[in-house]
């Protein structure tokens, strides 16, 4: 094998890797753009629904929002009875 053949093979392999990387990035970017568009559309739908409810004087629904958990108020008090026990 000639040195020029080895160099040509390495150049071809590097070019193939670069093309594969470019295709992979293009595919991921297209999927990202579809996801961004879907999230944006959902946000606009949710905003429009909230505006419709507000126009009718109703409370907006919580559809599509994460559930909220109410934390109970702390009513127990800790007493310091060190003076009484001595």
Image: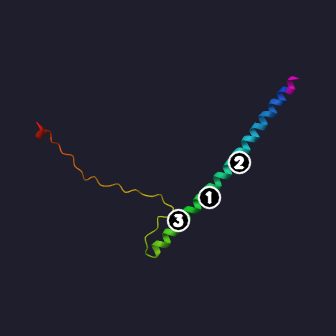
Q: Quickly name the residue at label 1.
A: 37
Q: Are marks 1 and 2 in contact (CB under 8 Å)?
A: no
The answer to if 84 sits in the magenta stretch is: no
In the image, residue 53 sits, relative to residue 1, either above or below, namely below
| Residue 74 appears left or right of 9 | left
The answer to if 3 sits in the magenta stretch is: yes
Identify which residue is drawn at 52% across, 65% down: 46
Q: Are marks 3 and 1 in contact (CB under 8 Å)?
A: no
- Give the Cα separation between the discs numbered 3 and 2: 30 Å
Mark 1, Cα crowd under 10 Å, few <14 / some 14-19 / many 20+, is few
Kindly indicate the quadrant of the structure image that contains residue 6. Answer: top right
| Residue 52 appears left or right of 26 | left
Q: How many marks?
A: 3
Kindly indicate the quadrant of the structure image that contains residue 19. Answer: top right
Over which residues does the magenta segment extend?
A: 1-5
- Give the Cα separation between the discs numbered 3 and 1: 14 Å
Instruction: Give the secondary structure at mark 1.
Output: helix
The quarter in which the N terminus is drawn is top right
Identify which residue is drawn at 50% across, 64% down: 63
Across and down, in percent, residue 45 comes to 55, 66
Q: Quickly name the residue at label 2.
A: 26
Tell me the tag on residue 45: none
Q: Which numbered disc, 1 or 2, marks the residue that appears first in the sequence?
A: 2
The quarter in which the C terminus is drawn is top left
Across and down, in percent, residue 70 comes to 37, 57
Q: Residue furthest bottom?
A: 56
In front here: 69 or 3? 69
Q: Quickly name the residue at label 3.
A: 46
Identify which residue is drawn at 12% across, 38% down: 85
Q: Which numbered disc, 3 or 1, marks the residue that appears first in the sequence?
A: 1
Identify which residue is drawn at 35% across, 54% down: 71
């Amino acid at each position: 094998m000639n040195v020029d053949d080895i160099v040509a093979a390495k150049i071809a392999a590097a070019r193939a890797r670069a093309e594969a990387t470019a295709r992979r990035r293009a595919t991921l970017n297209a999927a990202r753009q579809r996801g961004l568009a879907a999230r944006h559309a959902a946000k606009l739908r949710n905003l429009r629904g909230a505006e419709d409810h507000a126009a009718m004087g109703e409370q907006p629904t919580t559809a599509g929002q994460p559930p909220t958990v109410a934390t109970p108020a702390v009513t127990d008090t800790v007493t310091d009875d060190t003076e009484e026990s001595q």
